[in-house]
Amino acid sequence: DSGVTQTPKHLITATGQRVTLRCSPRSGDLSVYWYQQSLDQGLQFLIQYYNGEERAKGNILERFSAQQFPDLHSELNLSSLELGDSALYFCASSPGIYPLFDGSQGYTFGSGTRLTVV
Amino acid sequence: TQLLEQSPQFLSIQEGENLTVYCNSSSVFSSLQWYRQEPGEGPVLLVTVVTGGEVKKLKRLTFQFGDARKDSSLHITAAQPGDTGLYLCAGGRLDSNYQLIWGAGTKLIIKP
């Protein structure tokens, strides 16, 4: 158990629908990152939140949004889903803003949510 | 274009053999990390290297950061089936605000 909790583990939904993925970071970590991993694209950074504020954006589509709540858990909302959105979605956390300088701890990843759009 | 190129993309060898996988870039990185990901799980950090020429060992795994901090290698001695997984390198640069830049990974299979 990495300490990062993601729910649900699996999600099957139809095109055009909206889903919410949830992440609870490791205790004490203030940063949450969302990643998408598909077979053909590898691990793609979507967005980072630090202590409730958006910190950095990657290749996140406009149909996707995220937020981090006062208790530091985060949600990733995916709307108008398309077949191509089928992927593993990972949440990771780190103590500070820059994972490379957090005592070399880097990211701690959750086990992911496997999203299948049919 | 991948800023971090990993090679080979796929490697399947017998238990007991040695292997090296590479992570290369034309850019300089402030530091570089290696992760291992097993099916159905998230990546797990193995090591962080920050100094050019640095060598770190983790049991049978040896990690090296290139002198110019543009490349890294992971050498596994006497590979075991438990080493099977996807090995990812990730680097941070000042001009990317230190957000990790990820390679596509090397998928390693160790056959008993």
Image (tube, coloured by chain):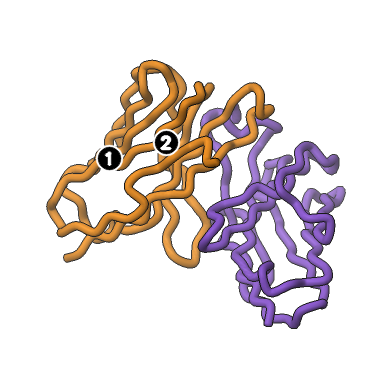
Task: Work out which residue is located at the far front of the displayed protein and give it.
Answer: B1
Marks counted in the figure total 2
| Residue shown at 29% from the left, 32% from the top | B57
The chain under label 1 reads: B
Proximity of marks 2 and 1: CB atoms separated by less than 8 Å = yes
Horizontal and vertical percent position of residue A84: 66, 69
Image check: B18 left or right of A47? left
Which corner quadrant holds the C terminus of chain B? bottom left
Label placed on residue B47: 2
Chain B: its colour in the image is orange
Relative to B92, say whether B80 is above or below: below
Residue at the spot of label 1: B61
Q: Quadrant where the N terminus of chain B lies? A: top right
The answer to which of marks 2 and 1 sits earlier in the sequence is 2
Amino acid under disc 2: Val
Residue for point 80% across, 59% down:
A64
The amino acid type found where label 1 is placed reads Leu
The chain letter of the purple chain reads A
Q: Callout 2: few (<14), some (14-19), or many (20+) C-alpha neighbours within 10 Å?
A: many
| Label 1 secondary element | strand
